[in-house]
Structures are given as structure tokens and as C-alpha cells.
Amino acid sequence: MLYYWPLFIIQNLVGPSKDSKREALSTHEALVQSWREAIEAAEKANMGEMWPIHVTDSGQIRLSFPTRNDENSLLRGEFMEFLESDEDDIGANIGQAAGGGVEKEVIVLDKPYTEAEEEIKVALVESVEEAIAESRPTNELQRIIPPWERTPSELRQIATTQPKSSSISSTKLSPASSTTVLKSQEKATEPVGPRWALAAKTCNLSGVWKLVESEEFKSQYDKYLLSLGQPAIVRTVALSLIGFTREEIIQEEEGRKLTINGINPRGMWNRLLISSGAEINKPSFQPIQREIYTADSEKVKAEAWWEGNGTIHKSWLRGGMKYGGGDFESSRYLASENVLICKSVFHPRDPKREKAQVTWRFQRDAAS
């Protein structure tokens, strides 16, 4: 008895063998290391943003839950069931999920196994309860299951499966759709819609313009006068003097105002056209109609705007009674820097009559 009692006491102090304490500590270190590997694998599988457990640079395991508003975003029951599992099963499951073994060198924790394990459990439970309290309801159809709601078997599948690329990032936008996206993100620099109150920044009709006289134009102008009901003697005189036609255009206030001073053998015809339409960040508008006098001294209502993204000035003179009654439509635009085109159309009130139209071509006066 005196011989064996000291041996029993020594064995209880040092363990079954001389290496038992070191083996127990090594087993604990291997378990903790497998936890670290599992956490790092889960972070990579879940892009490192939604996973609540993280390993710091110093090797410590920390809890950091993201803020989410998903309904029941944390399934406390599943998490608690995972924590209450047998410690050996936990280590085995997480180690398998990480794809690692227990033979690697580990970092020794400065606390006993049971104490460190208990602190991790307490921290997990507190974080789960706090996240549940802060959660808010949301649309279940849009809900994504966060990593901490998954079981160990699901974690193993995630850790061993190559993450799929996001369908959004892998989708290529067509040139037209990508241009639309870019334009929608840029600050508006021009109006929207087919009718503008402003001219394009590159369009300026200002200048003194001289009519380009040609046989083709004279033939077209003669048909135009005939459609208006003019007799042959009037058309002959008009054709002989049409080459003296001039137009002075003054464009102001970004194209909102267009003053046109017409000069021809009959005299001068001066009018101010005010454009109405969409403006920058103001798509809605009220049409502006104002009374002016025609070249025949007839009072009509004038309305004007810009088309073609601010490159074509459109004007209408409505309510005229001459030439059988009807409305005059004019479209002015630059064919080049020194060439101005004006298309004139007479819309007779009588639907049985055909429209009368002529295209005027002007050259910029070099002296202007």
C-alpha cells in the first residue's frame, strides 16, 4: 500500500502517461484551429460579409453580426441546437466543412478548453438574441438565407462548392441599354421629348441670308403660287423679282425667341416667334400662341417650338382667311454652317384641296 499509493497520487496529478496533459492540450488546440479554418472557409464561401463569426489577425475568434431587416433573420432554435451538440461532433463537423485536419500546428489559447468554449457559446447566444431583437419584417419573396441560419451539413456543402458568379455581374448589357443606364445617371443637360422650347447648343440660325435662285426653285415656286390660286400675271412678276429675297434672323435666349426680318420686292415682313416646349428638367409646358401679322397684313395666331433635338425650328400661323383659308407651316434648319433651309407648307382649310409647298434655300451673306 505504501508503495502504490504514491504512484496513484502522482498518476492523478500528471495523467495516465507523461504525455497525457500535452496530448489533451494538443487535442484542444487542434479543435480550436479547425474552428478557425471552418470560419475562414465560410467567410470565403459567403464573400466574407454576411458570416457573423470572424478570425482576427491575432488569431482570436470574434462575433460581428451585420445589420439586417429580414423577418426572422436568425433562427435561434437551429443555432442553439448546433451549440448544444456534442463538442466532439461540433469540432468534427466544422473541421470537415473547412476541409482541414487536426495534424496541423495550432495556436495555443491562453484559457482552458472548457472556459474558452463556454465564452464562445455565451457570446454567440447574446449576439443571436440581439440580432433577433433588431430584426424587422420584410417581403419573404426577397429574403436570402444568411449563413448563420444554415446547419453544419449545409456549411460543408458551401465550403466545398465553388461559389457561383452573380447573375447581375455576369450579365452583359447591350450597347443601347448600357448607354441608357449611363444617361440616366448623368445630370440632365437638355430637355426631353419631341418638342423643345430651346435650341440645341450647337444650333444658331442668326445671320443675314440670301436666297439661292435656280431654275428648279423657280419651277417649284411657280407651282406653289398656282396652288395658292395666284393668276399667271402675278406669278410671272413674282418669279422675276424673287431673287432679291433676303432674311435677317436674330436668335435669342437660347432659341426661345426668333426674330425674322424678311425683305422682298413687296416690302418688309417682320415677326417675332416665341418657342414653347420642354425645358431642362421641365418636361411639361403650356403652349404659347400670340397674334402677329402675315406678309399680307392679316392677323393670325403664331405658335413655335424646336424639333429634332433642338435643330429644327417649327412655326405655325393659324387662322388665315386668304387663299381660301388655311394655315402656314414653316421648318427652318441649317444644312451646313452657311446654308439655311426653309420648308414652307400651306394647309388649306378645304380638305378637297392639295397642300402647297416650296423649299427655300438660303446662303449666308458674307458681309453679315
Image (spheres, helix red, strand yellow):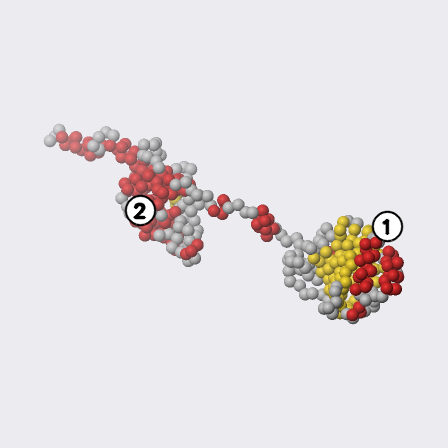
- 22 on left or right of 147: left
Q: Residues within 10 Å of mark 2 (few under 14, many from 20)?
A: some
For the N terminus, the quadrant is top left
The amino acid type found where label 2 is placed reads Leu
For label 1, the SS is: loop
**Residue plotted at (80% across, 58% down):** 220
**Residue plotted at (39% across, 37% down):** 59
User: Label 2: which residue?
Assistant: 83
**What percent of the width, then of the height, locates residue 341?**
77, 54
For label 2, the SS is: helix
**Vertical position of residue 355 compared to residue 53: above or below:** below
User: Label 1: which residue?
Assistant: 367
Camera-side residue of 363 and 10: 363
**Residue plotted at (76% across, 57% down):** 332
**What percent of the width, then of the height, locates residue 279?**
67, 58
Camera-side residue of 269 and 88: 269
Q: Can residue 153 be seen from the camera position used here?
A: yes
Camera-side residue of 215 and 46: 215
The amino acid type found where label 1 is placed reads Ala
- 204 on left or right of 368: left
**Numbered-mark total:** 2
Quarter holding residue 243: bottom right
Observer-side mark, 1 or 2, equals 1
**What percent of the width, then of the height, locates residue 5?**
14, 32
Quarter holding residue 227: bottom right
Q: Can residue 43 be seen from the camera position used here?
A: no
